[in-house]
Amino acid sequence: MREKTVNLKQDAAIHAPCKINVHLRIKDRRSDGYHNIESIFLALAFGDVLRFQLTGDEGVCAIQMDWRFFQDSGICAEELEPLPAEKNSIHQAVSLFRDRTGFNRGIQVYVEKRIPLGAGLGGGSSDAASTLSALNVLAGTALAPRVLKELAETLGSDVPFFLYGGAAWVSGRGEQITPIRMPEGLSVVLAYPGFPSNTGKAFRLLDETRFVQGYVSDESRTETLIHTLSEHPGKWTYQNDFLPVFLAEGDKEAVTAYRRILKTLDAAGADFTGLSGSGSACFGIFVDGGMAEKAVQAVDRQRNFVQLTIPLAHFPNRVLE
């Protein structure tokens, strides 16, 4: 069944924000191979920019990556290698959207890549969600939000969150999303240590080093965790299950980098520090924006990629004219 059509556009640009997990607990392993999680996702203003243009070459999806931000930031050149089409989240999203809608116009995608790869910041997932949102405008096919969410779930566990952004309680394998109130007046310092983290290896390490019991929902605990987000970050008791495992069982380079960055952020006055996703990016939350700016300088002296940003509010429509 085709959806309602609207006026067709020829080009569009969209912001693809990154996220951090201020809280991440890994629960039991599911029959589909995924793990159940409980997490608080927070979208940030820092991210990629994707520009789409329709062409006359039916069925073609050409993706051009702009790595200048990476190069200017000193991120390792090994990250600049293009992904094969079957592993590129933008290409996957285009293919899935075409299968669902029959839209077959040629597409040229220009990507200003800013989010480090393998950093636990959701760059690939955000690009995929942004692609679905942009194509829904370009194709003139107003897919209902529930349909876009179904497509996003097919693309990956974190993708549905990026259709909405803001702050959210995320559970299941990542597809169960409950928007929550965004904390105000916070600054976030992102610190990427210069190496990516392999998600599959991280989960295997986690499973090998602990006994994961079956997940039993505790709604009262969930409500407490959600309510805590509105309190001063200095009172947060959030945790990331990967971090203690990495510090105890990780390779020497990773352990040294994580300890150094987190210690530097703490010393610079961060009200809360943590690891995002399964790594490798660390972050510091600051109530005082001036202290956050000074923290950037302190972390930067260690020759890490560092970025000062802020939480990004809910976005009903991120497609730019």
Image (cartoon, rainbow, N blue to C red):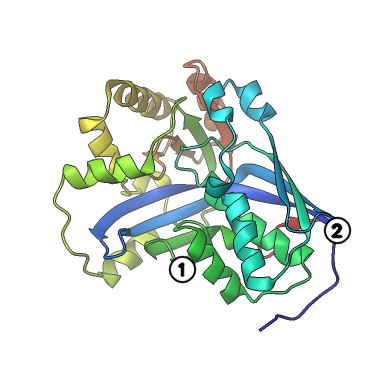
- When asked about the image quadrant of residue 165, the answer is bottom right
Q: How many marks?
A: 2
Question: Is 42 placed above or below 76 here?
Answer: below
Q: Is residue 227 left or right of residue 288?
A: left
Query: Which quadrant would the N terminus be assigned to in this image?
Result: bottom right
Kind of residue at badge 2: Gln
Q: Secondary structure at mark 1?
A: strand
Instruction: State the mark number for residue 10.
Output: 2
- Counting from the top left corner in percent of width and height, residue 275 is at 38, 39
* Residue at point 25%, 31% (across, down): 247
* Residue at point 81%, 54% (across, down): 57
Outermost residue, bottom side:
1
Res 314 seen here: no
Instruction: State the mark number for residue 178.
Output: 1
Task: Work out whether residue 264 or residue 302 is closer to the camera in this orientation and state it.
Answer: 302
Question: Is 243 placed above or below 10 here?
Answer: above
Query: Which quadrant would the C terminus be assigned to in this image?
Result: bottom right
- Counting from the top left corner in percent of width and height, residue 91 is at 62, 51
Q: Secondary structure at mark 2?
A: loop
Crowding near the residue tagged with mark 2, few <14, some 14–19, many ≥20 C-alpha atoms within 10 Å: few
Task: Work out whether residue 34 or residue 162 is closer to the camera in this orientation and state it.
Answer: 34
Q: Is residue 319 left or right of residue 246?
A: right
Q: Is residue 88 left or right of residue 173?
A: right
- When asked about the image quadrant of residue 202, the answer is top left
Res 42 seen here: yes
* Residue at point 73%, 67% (across, down): 103
Q: Work out whether mark 2 precedes mark 1 in sequence or the reverse, and give the earlier one.
A: 2
**Residue at mark 2 to residue at mark 1: CA–CA distance:** 34 Å
- Counting from the top left corner in percent of width and height, residue 271 is at 41, 38
Kind of residue at badge 1: Thr
Contact flag, marks 2 and 1 (Cβ < 8 Å)? no
